[in-house]
Structure formats: C-alpha cells, structure tokens
C-alpha cells in the first residue's frame, strides 16, 4: 500500500481542504455510521445469508435463480455478526466482510480526523492508494467466490 506516513505528511502539506472536502469527509462519517449502526441492529440470519431482507431488500436473485451464492451473499449477515464480535460466524458467512468491516470501522475516526485536519479528500484518497485497496478486495472477493462455488458444485456431486 505504500508509505502511509509519507502519504499523511504529503496530504497535510497540500492545499487546505475546501468546504466540499469537509462535506466528503462528513459523508464518509455518516455512511460508516449508518453501516455500523445497521449491522448492530440487524439480527444475523442463522442460514448465513438473507439478513439484508430485514432492511426491506429483496432476497438475492442470483441465489434464487441458481441455488448458488453470489459474491456478496452473506456480507450483511457477516457484518451483523462482526458488530457482535462473533468473528468465526462472520467468517463462515463471508470472509470478505472482515476487512470490509475493519475498513468501515476505521473510516469513522479517520474521517473525523481528516475533516478536522483539513485534509483534501481526493488527494488524500489518491495518496493512500484507496483505489488499489478496493482492487485488492475485489480480487480477493472474486477468488473467494470462485472457490466457494467450486466447493459447492463438487460437494454436491460427491
């Protein structure tokens, strides 16, 4: 991910954050707060998927059509487990949720610190290489999904 300390020093010496930068950090704070509060309020589904239906969302269409989980199946359930510190149950629901939950949790204090410290939003994200983090997570999620599907398909044949 690069030199985080150097990225922070560079971001501090950059031009002061404009009002839109502070609004962006506020948006991150509100979004992270909403996700974490929702995760705590939801009751994890015992099946490992479907917790998101408590939010009024429809069941997973991919799962309904194929009887196989989509890459996001279990993420909401895992977040609900992680909000209760049930790490093993979260890993069983969807292991990708763990780094996503940690990132969401860290986004809360980070966004406050960045807004107070007048860090420019776009430049800070670029220097921290957030795009690479997302690509890494997407690749890991896809790889996990492929293994999960292969396991389910081959296990059903045995």
Image: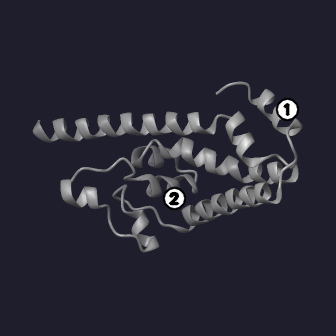
> In the rendered view, does 17 fall on the left or right side of 122?
right
Q: Where 56 falls versus 103 (above or below)?
A: below
Q: Where 149 falls versus 54 (above or below)?
A: above
Of 133 and 89, which appears nearest the observer? 133
Q: Quadrant of residue 46?
A: bottom left
| Quadrant in the picture for the C terminus | top left
> In the rendered view, does 157 fall on the left or right side of 9?
left
Of 71 and 15, which appears nearest the observer? 15
Task: Report the residue at 37% width, 53% height from top.
Answer: 73
Of helix, strand and loop, which one carries label 2?
A: helix
Q: Which residue is mark 1?
A: 9
Of helix, strand and loop, which one carries label 1?
A: helix
Q: CA distance from mark 1 to mark 2?
A: 35 Å
Of 148 and 92, which appears nearest the observer? 148
Task: Report the residue at 19% width, 53% height from top.
Answer: 66
> In the rendered view, does 74 fall on the left or right side of 148?
right
- Which residue of the protein is positioned furthest toward the bottom in this rendering? 56
- Which residue of the protein is positioned furthest toward the left in this rendering? 157
Query: Residue 35 location, x and y as percent?
Result: 59, 61
N-terminal-most mark, 1 or 2: 1
Task: Report the residue at 88% width, 47% height from top.
Answer: 16
Q: Which residue is mark 2?
A: 80
Badge 2 crowding class, 10 Å Cα cut-off, few under 14, some 14 to 19, many 20 or more, is: many
Q: Where 121 falls versus 157 (above or below)?
A: below
């Amino acid at each position: 991910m690069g030199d985080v300390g150097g990225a922070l020093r560079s971001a501090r010496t950059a031009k002061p954050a404009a009002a839109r930068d502070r609004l962006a950090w506020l948006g991150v704070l509100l979004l992270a707060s909403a996700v974490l509060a929702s995760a705590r309020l939801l009751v994890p589904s015992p099946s490992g998927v479907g917790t998101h239906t408590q939010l009024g969302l429809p069941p997973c269409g991919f799962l309904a059509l194929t009887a196989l989980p989509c890459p996001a199946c279990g993420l909401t359930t895992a977040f609900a487990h992680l909000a209760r510190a049930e790490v093993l149950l979260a890993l069983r629901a969807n292991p990708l949720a763990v780094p996503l939950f940690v990132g969401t949790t860290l986004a809360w204090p980070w966004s406050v610190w960045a807004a107070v410290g007048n860090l420019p939003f776009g430049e800070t994200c670029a220097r921290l290489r957030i795009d690479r983090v997302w690509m890494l997570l997407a690749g890991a999620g896809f790889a996990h999904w492929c293994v999960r599907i292969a396991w389910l398909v081959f296990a059903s044949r045995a």
